[in-house]
Amino acid sequence: MLRIDQYAYTNALKNVHPAEKCIMAISFLFFSILSKNLYITGFSFLTMSLLIIFAAKLPFRQYIKLLFIPAIFLLTSMITIILSFAPATNEPNTFFWSMNFSSWIVYISPYSLTQAYQLITTVLASVSCLYFLIITTPLHQLIWVLRKMKLPVLFIELIGLTYQFIFVLLANIQEIYIAQTSRLGYRTYRSSLSSISMLVVNLLIKSLRSAKETQIAIDSRGGDEGLYDVEINLNYRKDHALVIVFCITLLTFISIFTR
């Protein structure tokens, strides 16, 4: 999380207008989720990955590490989708693989494989779109876009505060963990369990204290003013607009002619 936030403020696309980046990412995300077309999801994943690596200048190894995180959850979901169970007396007519297990049969059907590859392609394309957005767009630019979309101020402030407290939480975890490690708190299995339980308790206390201090600071200012009054001085670019229009048009043609 800390590394992603660092890249958001140091990437090569940080000075591109946030509206352009949001339209680009959301357009590809919209087509990928609704169409579930292999060509569209493949094109979306390839385009977003190239933009992240070559346009935003994110190291290739870091991008692979970021993709590895959702891949773990995707793998567990795939197993439950691919494998089907049925009583041994109701053996399916068509399957690629099967195995008898007591009075049950475990098998892989063509339908489950189709669902699995649709899930893989859709998830990877969607994740790449979201990574492009959060890696290239700092928080203040995202807040500016949300304000221009006329979303409720309370909703925007909750997003900002949640984002802030994530880093407060991570900083507290690191401080407590370093203090415990310096005292050999994780030397044995028994001491590790004790240290983890103490870390959770102290983390809860620190989080509640930090939330209370934030609430006091908001109340001291009256509590009725927006916390995030953001203005940016970035200009739209015609070449970026042409690229966005071209990509949306191409996605539309692909979705029409590959049904």
Image: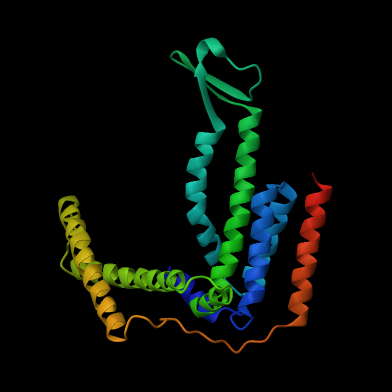
Which residue corresponds to the image point at 64% horizontal and 43% vertical from the top-left? 118
Q: Residue at x 79, y 57 (%)?
A: 252
Image quadrant where residue 250 sits:
bottom right
Give the percent coordinates (x, y) of residue 26. 64, 63
Say left or right for 240 vs 25.
right
Question: Is 136 above or below relative to 221?
Answer: above
Q: Residue furthest top?
A: 89
Q: Position of residue 149 (x, y in %)?
A: 58, 72
Which of the 4 image quarters holds residue 251? bottom right
Q: Position of residue 176 (x, y in %)?
A: 22, 69
Quadrant where the image shows the C terminus: top right
Counting from the top left corner in percent of width and height, residue 121 is at 64, 48
Q: Nearer the viewer, residue 39 or 154?
A: 154
Tell me, yes or no, if residue 190 can be seen here: yes
Q: Is residue 40 left or right of residue 213?
A: right
- Residue 169 vs residue 196, the one in the foreground: 169
The answer to which of 136 and 193 lies nearer the viewer is: 136
Q: Is residue 121 above or below residue 233?
A: above
Instruction: Report whether residue 186 is seen.
Output: no
Q: How many marks?
A: 0
